[in-house]
Amino acid sequence: MNGFIAAILVIFVSANIGFIVSLIKKRNDVADIFWGIGFILVAWTSFFLAESFNNRALLVNVLVTIWGLRLAFHIGLRNRGKGEDFRYKAWRESWGKTFYWRSYLQVFILQGFFLFLISLPLVFVNPGNAEFSLFDVLGLLIWLIGFFFEAVGDYQLLQFTKNAENKGKIIQTGLWKYTRHPNYFGEVVLWWGIFFFALPFGFWTIISPLTITFLILYVSGIPMLEKKYENNPEFAEYKKRTSAFFPMPSK
């Protein structure tokens, strides 16, 4: 089966399962858990459809699996025992009678479309026969940097929110001292790392990291999250002295 068709089918099935789960759980934020899982499914489906074993592909798939599982478990633990994420809750309240079909199309199917664009390097790396090169070394180093920022940033935030004394406060320590969104920075960077693995198969696979960069910086990442704190005086001061994305010394 063609890798593109297989990826589309896997993503479509995953999106529909996610939608059904959201109806049962009555919370659309399960889409965030299915995000990481979707990439894992695309990676291994295209890997096993390949005609030959590929060590480069195996490495990339392992990296994607580590990232996807960590992200899914982190979000699942973060949401356990809590209400629906405020962003999804706002849509639930504003969509009214159109909630079900808009949830299906604007949350799960649209997410599937972006997942396909971002996973394109996997579709090319898995059946590819390129030898290890400096591009792979560079890609691995970039991925490790990105994974460090995302995983450590998430862990630091989780520990901060677990402390009852920090309720209502803004985390400003650890990696959060140098960027307001170390986890978002990390996710963007690690996908740039994956892109370097796919570079031998065409520069146009750059659509993957460009897509996740655009989404994080201008659509569903930083803008939506920071809107929640736009009237928070503590966040306003934090925002003045801390970089929004790239880690930089605090002003």
Image (cartoon, helix red, strand yellow):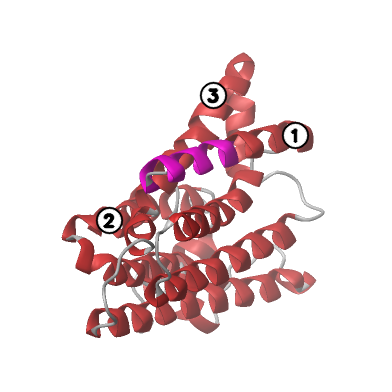
User: Can residue 201 be seen from the camera position used here?
Assistant: yes
Q: Which residue is mark 2?
A: 210
Q: Which residue is mark 3?
A: 102
Mark 1 to mark 3 CA distance (whole Å): 14 Å
Report the front residue among 230 and 201.
201
Quick one: label 3 or label 2, which is nearer the N terminus? 3
Residue with the most extreme top position: 97
Quarter occupied by residue 178: bottom left
Q: Residues within 10 Å of mark 1 (few under 14, many from 20)?
A: few
- Is label 1 in a helix, a strand or a loop? loop
Magenta residues? 3-15
Residue with the most extreme front position: 51
Quadrant the N terminus occupies: top left
- Is label 2 in a helix, a strand or a loop? helix
Task: Give me the disc on residue 26.
Answer: 1
Amino acid type of the residue tagged 2 in the rendering: Leu
- Is label 3 in a helix, a strand or a loop? helix
> In the visual, does 40 lie left or right of 1?
right
Residue 234 in percent (x, y) is at 53, 65
Amino acid type of the residue tagged 1 in the rendering: Lys
Q: Is residue 8 magenta?
A: yes
Quarter occupied by residue 236: bottom left
